[in-house]
Image: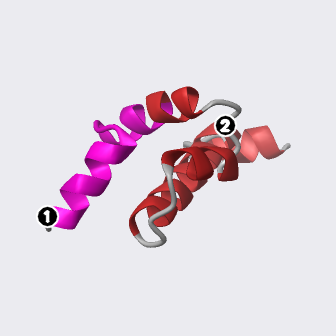
Amino acid sequence: MLYRKLKDEGTSYQKIKDDMRRELAINKLVTEKLSVEEVSELVGFAEPRSFTRAFKQWTGLTPRSYCKYQSLK
């Protein structure tokens, strides 16, 4: 039933989960200045390498590059 409702809305559980992970990760990296390792663990990745790969898919940048870019704004 949930799957069908999400499909009707044009989304999925995985997309919602990824969106929440992305938003939380960005907030923790930029606002709270946590390390990549801390954020990786906090948002549920077993390895920082996996988190970095996912973050790059989400934003087009590595977490460190994203933080540097944000600090220049």
Q: Which residue is mark 1?
A: 72
Where residue 70 sits: x, y (%)? Answer: 24, 61
Near-viewer residue (52 or 60) = 52
Mark 2 Cα shell of 10 Å, populated few (<14), some (14-19), many (≥20): some
Where residue 66 sits: x, y (%)? Answer: 29, 49
Most prominent secondary structure in the magenta stretch? helix
User: What amino acid type is highlighted by mark number 2?
Assistant: Phe
Residue 66 placement, left or right of 4 = left
User: What amino acid type is highlighted by mark number 1?
Assistant: Leu
Q: Residue at coordinates 46% horizontally, 34% vertically from top-left? A: 52
Residue 47 placement, left or right of 33 = right
Q: Which residue is mark 2?
A: 45
Where residue 7 sits: x, y (%)? Answer: 65, 39
Q: Quadrant of the C terminus?
A: bottom left
Quick one: which residue is furthest to the bottom in this view? 31
SS state under label 1: helix
- Identify the mark nearer the N-term, 1 or 2: 2
The answer to which quarter of the image holds residue 61 is top left
SS state under label 2: loop
The answer to which quarter of the image holds residue 47 is top right
Residue 3 placement, left or right of 64 = right
Marks 1,2: beta carbons within 8 A: no
Quick one: which residue is furthest to the right in this view? 1
Please provide the residue range marked out in magenta.
Answer: 54-72
Q: Residue at coordinates 67% horizontally, 37% vertically from top-left? A: 45
